[in-house]
Amino acid sequence: MKLFTQLTAALSAIIALAGLASAQTASTTLDGLPNFSSADMPTARVNTLTVTLTPDAGLIHGLRGTTVGWGFSITWQSNAGDKIAFTGSRLVGDTSAFTNGYVDYIGKLSGKTNGITAAGETWERPFVENSGGLGAVPLLASAKPGSGYVGKLRLAFDVFDSRGPALGETLGSFEMLLDVAVLVDAEDPVEQTITFASIADPTYGSAPFTVSPTASSGLPVTLTSLNPEVCTVDGNTVTIVGAGTCTLLAEQDGDTQYNPAPRVTQSFTVAKGAASVSITGNLTPSFDGTPKPLSGTPTPGSLEVTLLYGGDPTPPSSPGLYAVKALINDPNYTGFATADLLIIDLTEPALSTYGDWLAAHFGPEFIGNPALVGATANPDSDAFQNSFEYAMGFDPLAPSSVDENNALPRLSVTPVDWTLSLSIPEQAGSDVTFIIETSPDLSPNSWQEISRRVGGGAWTGTATVFTGSPQNSRIPILISQPGLPISGRRFYRMRVIVQ
């Protein structure tokens, strides 16, 4: 397609110069030339001289970097037998856009033998580079095919009278103009390729950067962004305007010497910019039945923030501990923050009684059966009496589970204290008393009470008690005795009294 375009352009130029495609003849007649007598005095007779110039072509072609010119023939007639000497030829006008200048061959040749050319003779010269013709036109290597010159070739000559074998008296200097043209021919185009190096992935907010794709022809490469919402291009400068994937297209359309290059693309990924967000608001509100929303403050401040409460965007209203996450919601930035929201229920729980517990686990038909509902009964045969299962929040009709066993007291020793861990129901019965005792040797009179909890009251005694946040409706308890010697043996037990 490119070659067709080039040939079409060249053909159009040739058609435009069709009038000069064949040899053009220039002729000039000089009337009123004086005639000298043997006494070197002009006579009253008037001479007439006609000069005719015919180049071998009016329009000449050439590839850039080559030299072209015209061959020619010149004849003239003189009624007095005058002589003529040619002094120079020159293209008229500026040819610097496509030539290195014009070399004058006519001036070098200066006519025929001794510079004399007799009337009626024909002087012919073919174009031979560096030696003959109507001058030489050296075409620039950088000339654009299809360019050229349409103008005049000026031929200068002197006329002398006819006396003697040498030139006689000068009758005058004259010139004539010939219509000529030069056309730089199109060459067969050359294939070219584009080299486009890979681009490192930037981050949104990065400064503009330059890329440098090159064509093997040396011709300039045009860049286009196929994703202007992510990056834009101005010349070779790439500006990041958003996060995502951007593809740059490199093109070189060729010229009269080169075919269009195969298109090349380079893609890169713009990472989101880093943003920060802080979670603000009351992280430990009291339960009152209303939602407890928090706020997210982003930097930069114009960004949108999404808050999730345990994965749910709806602010919670029920008591409990919620993992809060604040997320930057923006196509160009990323960031997050986390916090814990604890909604505390300060309402005193309604404490149950052993009778309430029996009604919740046994149907009316079993309430009158002491073998099932008595305080010392063990209907699930798991070694725990009903009163203990009630106090600890266990199921009286199911054998003890792993979770129930994990709730029982466990002793651990550190370099600084003895610690007993257990868990009790969050809503322990109002008629339950927990008593923690310790003994160095298990002898009957050696047991000493170190802590006690009655109903839903506080732990009292000499031991240090740590109460954790409720988990799965149970309260974790740590009971320690700091300052006791770690060496030796020590025994602990928990007594449960249901009134």
Image (cartoon, grey):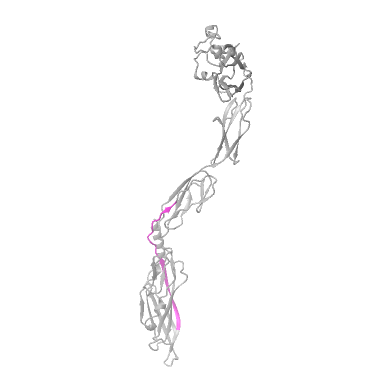
Q: Is residue 117 left or right of residue 315?
A: left
Q: Is residue 299 left or right of residue 265?
A: right
Q: Could you tell me which quadrant the C terminus lies in?
A: top right
User: How would you classify the magenta stretch by its main secondary structure?
Assistant: strand
Question: Does the magenta-highlighted stretch encompass residue 168?
Answer: no
Residue 274 at x, y = what percent?
55, 41
Segment colored magenta: 172-196
Question: Does the magenta-highlighted stretch encompass residue 185?
Answer: yes
Q: Identify whether 185 is placed above or below 288.
A: below
Which residue appears farthest toward the front when viewing the image? 487
Which residue is found at the position 44% from the left and 85% from the top?
170
Q: Nearest the camera: 213 or 416? A: 416
Q: Quadrant of residue 441?
A: top right
Tell me if I can see residue 351 in this picture: no
Q: Identify whether 126 is placed above or below 376.
A: below
Q: How many numbered callouts?
A: 0
Residue 315 at x, y = what percent?
59, 29
Q: Identify whether 27 is placed above or below 394.
A: below
Residue 333 at x, y = what percent?
55, 41
